[in-house]
Amino acid sequence: MTTTFTNNSSCVKQLRAEIEYPRDGVLSKVLLKDKICQYTLFCLAANTEISEHTSTRNATINVIEGRGLLTLSGEEIILEPGIFVFMPAHAPHALKAEENLAFLLTLSDNSSQD
């Protein structure tokens, strides 16, 4: 379901219509990818945990629905609809979905910052 753009085309998606919760675990859908960013919809079943990890890219989380807890560089952040979180590259982070949780994760190129 990935849409890849090589030019300046527009893309319109109704995010709530794309949400599908798995029985357990994580379902991710890459919605759009270009040379600089990747936009992925994450749908986590309640009580799903993603263990601590890092990314070589900057990232943002935009919560659409549900509730969870993000641990970012040792700080606990409540994930709920409307929350926007910026995570710099290489920052350790983990999360737990307290209930079904859907968010848009944007990974962006940080090569100009290295």
Image: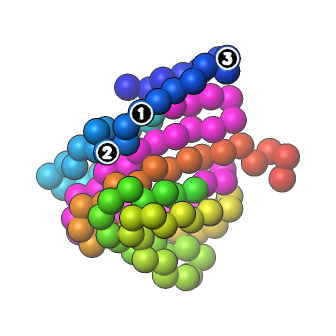
Instruction: Identify which amino acid the numbered label 3 is placed on.
Output: Asn
Q: Residue at x 62, y 28 (%)?
A: 34
Label 2 to label 3: alpha-carbon separation: 26 Å
Residue 58 appears anywhere in the view? yes
- Could you say which disc has been placed on residue 13 in the image? 1
Residue 47 drawn in magenta: yes
Instruction: Identify which amino acid the numbered label 1 is placed on.
Output: Lys
- Could you say which disc has been placed on residue 7 in the image? 3
Label 3 to label 1: alpha-carbon separation: 18 Å
Label 2 to label 1: alpha-carbon separation: 9 Å
Nearest-to-viewer mark from 3 and 1: 1
Residue nearest the viewer, comparing 14 with 35: 14
Q: Position of residue 14 (x, y in %)?
A: 37, 37
Secondary structure under badge 3? loop
Q: Position of residue 102 (x, y in %)?
A: 34, 55
Residue nearest the viewer, comparing 91 with 105: 105
Instruction: Identify which amino acid the numbered label 2 is placed on.
Output: Arg
Of mark 3 and mark 1, the one earlier in the sequence is: 3
Residue nearest the viewer, comparing 29 with 51: 29
**Position above or below: 22 against 31:** below
Residue underneath mark 2: 16
Residue span colored magenta:
32-59
Neighbour class for label 3 at 10 Å: few (<14), some, many (≥20)?
few
Image quadrant in which the N terminus is located? top left
**Position above or below: 89 against 47:** above
Q: Is residue 20 left or right of residue 88?
A: left
Q: Residue at x 35, y 71 (%)?
A: 68
